[in-house]
Amino acid sequence: MTDKKYLKIAFSPELRGKDRLIYRALEIFPGALAWGTLSGMFLASYFIPVYAAFFIIIFDLYWLIKTVFLSLHLRANARRMKIHLDTDWAERLTRFHWEHLWHLVIFPMANESREVVKSSVEAILKSAWPKERMIVALSYEERYGEHGRAVAEKILADFGPALPNIFSTMHPTGLEGEIPGKGGNETWAAREAKKIFIDPRRIPYENIIVSSFDVDTQIYPRYFECLAWHFLTAKNPVRASYQPVPVFNNNIWSAPALSRVVATSGTFWQMMQQERPERLTTFSSHSMSFKALADLDFWQTNIVSEDSRIFWNSLLFYDGQYESIPLSYPVSMDANLAPTFWRTVKNVYRQQRRWAWGVENFPYTVFGFLKNKKIPLRTKLYYTFNMIEGYWSWSTNALLLFALGWLPVLLGGREFNTMVLAYNLPTITRTIMTFAMVGLVASAIISMQLLPPRPPHYGRLRTASMVLQWILVPFTIIAFGAIPALDAQTRLMLGKYMGFWITPKHRK
């Protein structure tokens, strides 16, 4: 990168002069575009209702085509994921020299219960990868010190004999340049692993694959072999991230329908992105080379969305020569669940808003593109357009589809409402949306295929609810999609920067 000092920037107040103005304008842009679209819909419906009506029809057709396009990707990835789950990855690895590879697994901890951490470590233990070439880090926060230490010590006592390179460490509070969050914790853990295991044993950094897992992440038995195979077959293994599919199955049978729909919708989006690797970035639990992490001085510690930011850090650092490789292989995580229904609803919203706060990557990346003259213009334009389209769609499309489509009829006045167009507009939009919603049938089928076995204390009625839950989609994509995205973009636009919110882990 032409100017490496900008790689760890978080927000515009950290800059001065012209740079600060440019970065601030980029922070404002996504929210201004979203609000401009929504307010423009009201104004157009009042002043030029005919044009607004045609826009709604064209937009609905665009949404129908997009729905079909993404549905095909979803089906393709569902098939691919099934194939990858059935693949003998150990046999595939015999065609390569792989005995030099190590896996470093990092579990950043907060105040989660021992049951949550134990389940994740047990899944590591059940994996087929040789445990003597695996390092497992349990990194608990100082602010939850007594609880974290007690959980970590119990896990070490239970699993230490079987995992010879498992260790725990405490991430101190208040380190310079950090905000409380996952980025600081996992960076601390990686540096501790480097100091305790990697450098003393002189393990080459390019031989280590790092998996940063949310603490509720439970891997499937062949995950590390699948990951190693993709690492060994990558064009440039160091300059790549490796993204599994997050499937929120750990407690899916216990979660209420709203939480299940939102969680499974997130899984479906990641599955569709796996079929478009040129648009895939890192999300939540992900893997990458320790060499790349060391080059970058590890994850960024002063932002919320460090999981996706590490991709953009890498893209800028390596002058556009970086990619995210889809594994089409699942990891199981927790759906949002709290002791009460309304607390669950609140937590779902806050989690979705935190994910939507990934919009902070837009000003960072575009500003980096302006500073880095080595990245091809085509690459810059491609990523910039995809980010703009993605964040705009997230915050506006559901509202345009389900809430604002009737505005020309309501606001267009008497003259417009006497036109044939006004009479037919609701019928046309309803028909197009009916065809678009047929995709929910495919979603219901695929969601059932992803489910773990039904617990014995639930009956067939619970299974039926897993199918019927998809009628909630028009509500969930507004209440837990567009609105939290608009919330996050508005906060960034106004300079009301968010801190890191830890999703509580609760299991019945």
Image: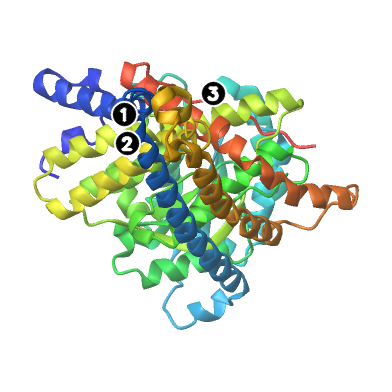
Front: mark 2 or 3: 2
418, 431: nearer the viewer: 418
The residue under label 3 is 142
Question: What amino acid is found at the position of numbered circle 1 in the picture?
Answer: Ile
Q: Secondary structure at mark 2?
A: helix
| Quadrant containing the N terminus in the rendered view | top left
Question: Which of the two marks, 3 or 1, is nearer to us in this view?
Answer: 1
Measure the C-alpha gap from mark 2 to mark 3. Answer: 58 Å
Q: Badge 2: few (under 14), some or many (20 or more) residues near its Cα, within 10 Å?
A: few
Horizontal side, residue 440 vs residue 390: left or right: right
Identify the residue shown where x is 44% and y is 33%: 356
- Disc 1 crowd rating (10 Å Cα; few below 14, some 14-19, many 20+) is some
Amino acid at pointer 2: Tyr
Residue placed under numbered mark 2 in the picture: 51
Task: Please name whichever residue, 209 or 352, is drawn nearer the observer in this view of the structure.
Answer: 352
Query: Quick check: 137 above or below 279?
Result: above
Q: Which mark is residue 48?
A: 1
The image shows residue 34, relative to residue 199, as above or below, that is above
Residue at image x 38%, y 62%? 207
**Do residues under tags 1 and 2 come within 8 Å of each other at their CB atoms?**
yes
* Residue 136 in picture, x, y percent from top left: 55, 49
